[in-house]
Image (cartoon, rainbow, N blue to C red):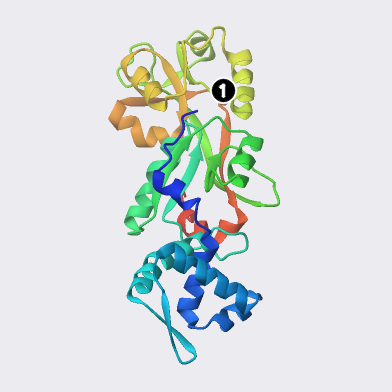
């Protein structure tokens, strides 16, 4: 695991009691030490002591008294302008605070789901002129991993084949995912249909995954219809498409992906007289983000 370089500026902040800045912003806003004391349910002397410490730290008087009101100095104006926006953003991260619209969504998918979800979600945000950006990561997912990613706030939304049941997490089905068998358009060995006998000995590329559902259904297909191992297992969806396009190998991919990439990679669909596995894709996110994400995810892949 790589470490992130620590800025000297961040280290210098450890010497400062950031609570002094919040008290400063309150004094700046209301112009009264006694009013701030009432707001925070502390003594006026405690507020005065905090102000004294900040004055010594900044080397400026910060406020001058005019009757019962404290008026800010020029330095105080600049300090407030540079501080209040940071404090406002930090306050939205606290438990129980009202979340603001995120500027970036971090989403996780498995590799084979990525080409189904990420392009369409990006296109939707662009068409809506949204200023939200996406950070996409792939991972081997299971129910426990998804719950951990969301509860530990490593992800805003996770797309997977798992319907998550958790008191803190909202989960909804995005779409059903039908799988199809595909080959290169000029593949000389296969026509538009395939028999069980031909499929049994075909060179087949597949997706390398730890997803329990995919492994289970793959084992059923292999036991019933396959006599040999797949010639390649890879986590790269693009590699699967390229190999199918350039060799006589067959591959099983989502129907939506075939509709999107068939012309680009010159692929054809091969009908089977035996069933292929079917899955559903679900989106999972923390319930506290329901308002933020519902508009973004609404109608996705419909």
Element carrying mark 1: loop
Q: Is residue 238 above or below residue 299?
A: above
Position of residue 256 measured from the top left corner of the image (x, y, whole percent): 43, 37
Q: How many numbered discs? A: 1
Which residue is at 57% across, 35% downward?
Answer: 279
- Which residue occupies the foreground of this view, 245 or 25? 25
Which residue is at 43% across, 68% downward?
Answer: 84
Say if residue 272 shows up in the picture.
yes
Position of residue 77 measured from the top left corner of the image (x, y, whole percent): 36, 74
Residue at the bottom extreme, as displayed? 67
Position of residue 141 measured from the top left corner of the image (x, y, whole percent): 58, 33
Q: Which residue is mark 1?
A: 274
Which residue is at 37% across, 65% downward?
Answer: 82
- Which residue occupies the foreground of this view, 37 or 167? 37
Position of residue 66 measured from the top left corner of the image (x, y, whole percent): 43, 89
Say if residue 301 shows up in the picture.
no
Q: Is residue 162 left or right of residue 205?
A: right
Q: Is residue 155 above or below residue 20?
A: above
Q: Residues within 10 Å of mark 1 (few under 14, many from 20)?
A: few
- Which residue occupies the foreground of this view, 44 or 159? 44
């Amino acid at each position: 695991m790589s470490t992130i370089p620590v800025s000297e500026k961040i280290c210098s902040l450890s010497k400062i009691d950031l609570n002094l800045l919040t008290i400063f912003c309150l004094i700046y806003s209301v112009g009264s030490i006694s009013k701030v004391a009432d707001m925070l349910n502390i003594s006026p002397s405690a507020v005065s002591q905090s102000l004294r410490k900040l004055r010594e730290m900044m080397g400026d008087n910060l406020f001058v008294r005019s009757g019962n009101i404290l008026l800010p100095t020029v330095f105080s104006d600049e300090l407030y302008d540079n501080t209040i926006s940071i404090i406002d953003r930090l306050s939205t991260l606290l438990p129980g605070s009202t979340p603001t619209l995120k500027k970036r969504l971090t989403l996780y998918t498995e590799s084979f789901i990525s080409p189904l979800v990420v392009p369409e979600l990006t296109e939707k945000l662009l068409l809506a002129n949204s200023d939200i950006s996406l950070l996409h990561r792939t991972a081997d997912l299971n129910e426990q991993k998804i719950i951990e990613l969301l509860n530990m706030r490593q992800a805003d939304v996770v797309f997977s084949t798992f319907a998550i049941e958790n008191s803190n997490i909202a989960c909804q089905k995005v779409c059903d995912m039908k799988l199809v068998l595909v080959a290169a358009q000029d593949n000389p060995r296969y026509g538009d249909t395939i028999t069980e006998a031909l499929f049994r000995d075909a060179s087949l590329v597949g997706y390398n995954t730890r997803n329990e559902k995919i492994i289970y259904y793959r084992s059923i297909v292999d036991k019933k219809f396959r006599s040999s191992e797949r010639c390649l297992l890879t986590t790269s969806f693009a590699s699967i498409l390229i190999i199918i396009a350039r060799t006589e190998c067959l591959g099983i991919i989502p129907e939506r992906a075939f509709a999107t990439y068939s012309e680009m990679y010159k692929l054809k669909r091969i009908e089977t007289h035996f069933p292929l596995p079917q899955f559903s894709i679900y989106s999972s996110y923390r319930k506290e983000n329901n308002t933020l994400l519902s508009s973004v995810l609404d109608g996705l892949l419909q």
